[in-house]
Amino acid sequence: MASVKEQEAIRKLMVFLQEWDSGHKVARSRVLDSFIKSNNGKTEPELELEFSQGASLFLARLTAWLRMTYMHSTCLDKLLKSIGIFLSAAGGRRYLIEFLEIGGVMTLLEILGLNHLKEEDKRESVKLLQLVANAGRKYKELICESYGVRCLAELLATSTSAEAQEDAQVLLDTLGRGNPKYQHQVYKGLIAVLPCASPRAQQLALQTLGAIQELVGEAPPALLEPLLAVLGSAHLEVQHEALQLLPALLPLRVRPALLAALVAALTPPGHPALASRSESTADPNALCPREPTLAYIQQAAAAKAIGILAKESVEVAEELIQLNVVHGLMVAVGNMEHMPSQRHSSISLKYFVHTFPIVEEHMKKAVGDTLFQLFMDSPETWYTKMDQAQAEELASSILDIPKDMGRKQSTEEVQGSTPISFSWRLH
């Protein structure tokens, strides 16, 4: 038989629940304010003591009201924070199960897709989903089975809140780890974010792709096109993350296509740089250079990436030589419309010329003694000393390195010698 004290506690609980059931929006809002203030950070035993072993009865009411009102944003932030107190309570796994049994995950995901709701409400929803995912693999799978990856990727791509984007990224990263059944789905969801209009979303998506790349293994061919597109982003922080991802793709089957695409980016169709430069310099009204085109930005980024990847291994450098990378770098050096293209391609060209004597020999034949001596004297700044005629000569030079010459030469050089390893650092 319950003691007098226990009976009084139960009576107070029943009165509290009746007041909630009969209360309207204003009254319930006050209840939620008081609950959040008094119970934030409490453990499961402490919540049960507060509610006379009936905390689940209040959680059920909170969840039911959430499902009925979330589309109208009725006290939504307070509701989500109150539910979060239960889901984050130490030892409160049963609260999580009770929440999930009545469709809690689907409700949270639906909140993310409603454009009229506040970004802060969506952040609270993501925080609750993070609590669910942190509970273990089967809970990650539940979120993914409920189209959670698509909802989170859309939030990351379209949100106007940097904080909401970061919360979505953290949750996607969580879903991509310890979740082998759906980790490829997460990877593809992140790829789908890359073409979006938000540089911050692109940056976060690239960071997460790099973080889970080793777990996923092979990268799908569908990654290359959007990856090369963001490599040409005007936002340096996006370019940086794209460059960080590239070395992780070298051991994979996408490597030949990746290298070929980077070399192709060095040579924009028709070499428009030279013609446009001639036109702009002939125009007396052209007082300042034009804004660089996306093709030029991508050209510069590709030249930088090629230098980084070539230094990863001699084998990669040889493959690039067979793809006629030296000619592409010379075209980029001759692009007087875009100095970053000239700078990065010069630095990369320096590596190939100094590493492979066959490249040095054929480049000298192609560009002539004057230009070649200019390069050898100051390989990192020679482009600043070229005139228009020299730039055109450089870009139109034909460099014909026979197939496998680079590979044969490097093989001969390393026989009987200690292998050379290369390292790189992004600044």
Image: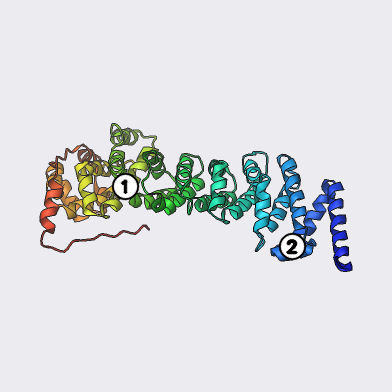
Label at residue 399: none
Q: In which quarter of the image is the C terminus?
A: bottom left
The residue that disc 1 covers is: 252
Residue displayed at 12% across by 51% down: 409
Res 362 quadrant in image: top left
Q: Do the residues labelled 1 and 2 touch (CB within 8 Å)?
A: no
Drawn side of residue 30 relative to residue 149, left or right: right
Res 38 quadrant in image: bottom right
State whether residue 413 appears in this view: yes
**Residue in front for this viewpoint, 137 or 67:** 137
Badge 1 element: loop
Badge 2 element: helix
Q: Where is residue 48 in the image (x, y as percent from the top left)?
A: 75, 62
State whether residue 369 appears in this view: no
Q: Where is residue 55 in the image (x, y as percent from the top left)?
A: 76, 58
Is disc 1 surrounded by few (<14), some (14 to 19) or many (20+) residues within 10 Å? few
Q: What is the CA distance from the residue labelled 1 to the residue labelled 2?
A: 52 Å
Residue displayed at 65% across by 54% down: 96
For badge 1, the amino acid type reads Leu
Q: Position of residue 405 (x, y in %)?
A: 12, 46
Is disc 2 surrounded by few (<14), some (14 to 19) or many (20+) residues within 10 Å? many
**Residue in front for this viewpoint, 380 or 356:** 356
Q: Nearer the viewer, mark 1 or mark 2?
A: 2
For badge 2, the amino acid type reads Leu
The residue that disc 2 covers is: 47
